[in-house]
Image (cartoon, rainbow, N blue to C red):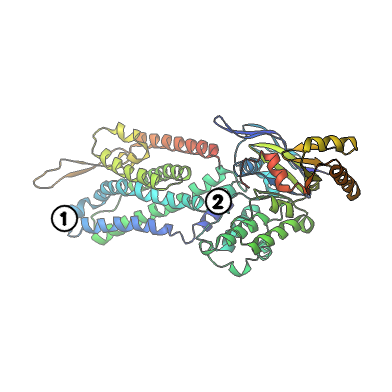
Amino acid sequence: MMTALRMEIWKSRRRWLWLICAALLAVELLWIFWAFHHPGEQDRQKGWLYLLYNMPLLNGVLFPVIGGTLASRVADVEHKGNTLKLLETLQTEARLFHAKLLLGMLYLLTIVVLQIVMILGMGVFYGFYGRPVLLDYVQYALFLFTACFAVYAFQLVLSMTVKNQVVPLCIGLAGSFIALLLMFLPYPLPRLLCGPYGFFGALSLVYMKDWNRDTRIFQLVRIPTPWGSFAVLLVWMVVIYLVGRIVLHRKEL
Amino acid sequence: MLTLIETNNLCKKYGKAVCVNALNLRVPEGAVYGFLGPNGAGKSTTLKMLLGLTRPTCGEIIVFGRPVTEKERIRLLRDVGSLIESPSYYGHLTGEENLRIVQTLRDRPAREIGEVLALVRLSQAKDQQVSQYSLGMKQRLGLAAALLGYPKLLVLDEPTNGLDPAGIQEMRELIRSLPARYGMTVVVSSHLLSEIDQMATDVGIIANGSLVFQDELHRLHERSAHHIALRTGNNVLAAELLGQEGVPCRAAEEYLILPPVEDGTLGQCSTLLCRRGIPVLRIEERQKSLEDIFLDLTGGTVSL
């Protein structure tokens, strides 16, 4: 398996995959700069919770596109050069699929770690009051990574199956809109049923209440960890994995 | 002689369309087996089934004496190199980097990359990105990837596609030399009879999904027997007279077809016909070309 993964890393030379990850982080960094350009007392007081509330929203909008692009870049190398008919005489399609999942996992892990570092760095930079709750950020990282990976896996299956990469990319774009729309729904059920896209919001640890339109004052509350939604996401991942395995196994070259 | 590839009643259907029908291939060890057939006859599908890239609808494939099953496939293919249809490559990587992937997955020593690059004359271009290669260079890179590990069996689907005449000749000579140099058995498909004729030792001809001929190449040549075609002013009477003289003949269009008789016998026949007032209009010595045989075997309705 490690050989297959090494070969995936080898293949990603000159594919600029890290640039896709950097683009996501750059947009998020710009957003934080914009949101805190003149931090007031309330911003500093609620800073840590505010980021925990907003980052999932931002991830929900951006990640389906970024994940779709990443998956497309990883899968497209095989379509472009007709390499599947060579590779599948050297390794099973399952091993190839696993290696591509692992490659994505490495990039996603990097994104998540850098995002956490970025959040903590910005908190220190803007002088947020108090210390961040470590457990909250560990849970945030776990949920973000799992949600990102589910979206990536779903997009990878699409990109490996369909030769024309416009199709999975459009689906990723649609997923981004779905994720955004689902965040406005008060009911959690649709978020859990609309594929892997709705989990960025569903796994948020912070809830906003008592928002005042005139004073723009609101309360941010740490809600109980949504382990139920996380369990549903894990079920989605298993389904995506199994469907991916079956579809790729049945695919004839 | 050991049979390296054997298929029994191999079939492939796409819906109701039968692409390959009850194919019984026998590829002997050490042969260059030319798999010949018109476009769309089922050559590529058959080769893909041999490699497990396409699942047969029915039938059995035996490679190196072992049935190719889902479980055994990758293990058996360790000794098989392949180049199917267009060459496989990563355009953003260099030629050498491309081969590194195959070498690593095949678990072969790195020095073999240089060796196969030299074999296909790509050493000069090894550091160039493959997207900048010409079609012929990509084809040679595909062959280099197939040769990596010096497998016992090489499956090449139309390997001369995209090559210039010099490249075709070079490729042909390389393929022909592989059994002697490396002990390989080569299965090479083509729709060009002349190409197979110049490099194969054995031949299988497929038409409309069915194998219509399979044997050593010289057996195919044996079918191209000489005969004499004779055209007279009265073929019916001439046939009767020649028959009485012990020269069998049969009518074919405007000619009488005679076996390859001696010059003296033919002279006597000619004199006899003239004496009986039957003018001899034309005498031709004919030999059935391989193309004729191929067209006869494949139904002759398809382009070569």
Q: Nearer the viewer, residue B226 or B75?
A: B226
Asked if the residues shown at circle 2 and circle 1 are in contact, with their CB atoms under 8 angstroms apart, the answer is no
Q: Quadrant of residue B39?
A: top right
Q: Is residue B277 left or right of residue B113?
A: right
**Residue A205 placement (x, y as % from top left):** 30, 42
Name the residue: 41% across, 42% down.
A150
Vertical position of residue B160 compared to residue A225: above or below: below
Label 2, secondary structure: give it.
Answer: loop
Q: Give me the chain letter of mark 1.
A: A
Q: Which mark is residue A83?
A: 2
Label 1, secondary structure: give it.
Answer: helix
**Residue B82 placement (x, y as % from top left):** 65, 50
Q: Which mark is residue B22?
A: none
Amino acid type indicated by mark 1: Glu
Q: Give me the chain letter of mark 2.
A: A
Decide: few, some or many residues near mark 1? Use Cα within 10 Å; few <14, some 14-19, many ≥20.
Answer: few
Q: Is residue B160 visible?
A: yes
Q: Nearer the viewer, residue B303 or B208?
A: B303
Q: Which mark is residue A41?
A: 1
Amino acid type indicated by mark 2: Thr
Name the residue: 58% across, 59% down.
B138
| Spatial separation of the CA atoms under disc 2 and disc 1 | 58 Å
Residue sitting at the far left: A214
Of marks 2 and 1, which one's residue comes earlier in the chain? 1
**Residue B248 placement (x, y as % from top left):** 86, 37
